[in-house]
Image: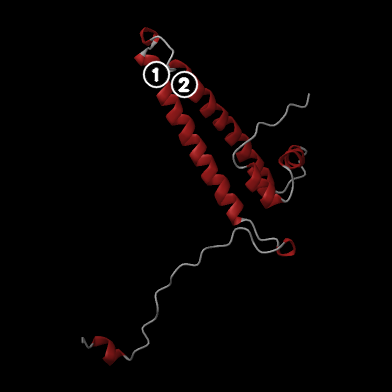
Amino acid sequence: MNTPLRPSSQDQAIESAFNGPVAELHRTATAGQAGPALFRAMELRSFLAVAESHVDRVRDRLHQATAPDRDQSELDAGDLRTDVEWMKAALTSRTEIVTALTRLLRSMPGREAAGPRRHQAIPTASPKANTAPPAARSRHP
């Protein structure tokens, strides 16, 4: 049975990095024909889709419980507290997965034939060497 892939917030970045639709990339990875980077990206994407579906479900449950037309006597502080803890866990997982996926995509080599690199390293400032003679360095203005 072919179940449809859950969407994820990073599908476009993955498609751009690997030059193909997520569904096809997924088939390649599950068939064992993917390189390590694609396999890892698809694995992280799968985790992300699950985490995001949990965020959606808990959000919807909180919205339903706190709907304006809902009887306030039906509110349960313990249930709301549990849902808030679930939301924290789901959001933390989502954030960590997105971070890992972003790092993976940034570490991939550029595709020169396809154009400029998508994920280039940001140059960092390096300290300038003091080229003044030693005697001049020790003097203070």
Residue sitting at 34 percent across and 89 percent down? Answer: 132
Residue sitting at 42 percent across and 18 percent down? Answer: 66
Q: Quadrant of the C terminus?
A: bottom left
Q: Residue 39: x and y, percent?
A: 68, 43
Which residue bears the numbered disc 2? Answer: 63
The number of numbered discs placed on residues in the rendered structure image is 2
In the drawing, does residue 135 fall left or right of residue 97? left
Q: Residue 87: x and y, percent?
A: 45, 27
Q: Nearer the viewer, mark 2 or mark 1?
A: 2
Amino acid type, callout 1: Leu
| Placement of 73 over or under 135, stated as above or below | above
Q: Residue 37: x and y, percent?
A: 66, 49
Residue 35 can be seen, yes or no: yes
| Placement of 11 over or under 52, stated as above or below | below
Residue 36 can be seen, yes or no: no
Q: Mark 2 falls on what kind of element?
A: helix
Q: Residue 16: x and y, percent?
A: 68, 50
Question: What distance separates the C-alpha of mark 2 from that of mark 1?
Answer: 11 Å
Which residue bears the numbered disc 1? Answer: 80
In the drawing, does residue 100 fall left or right of residue 118? left
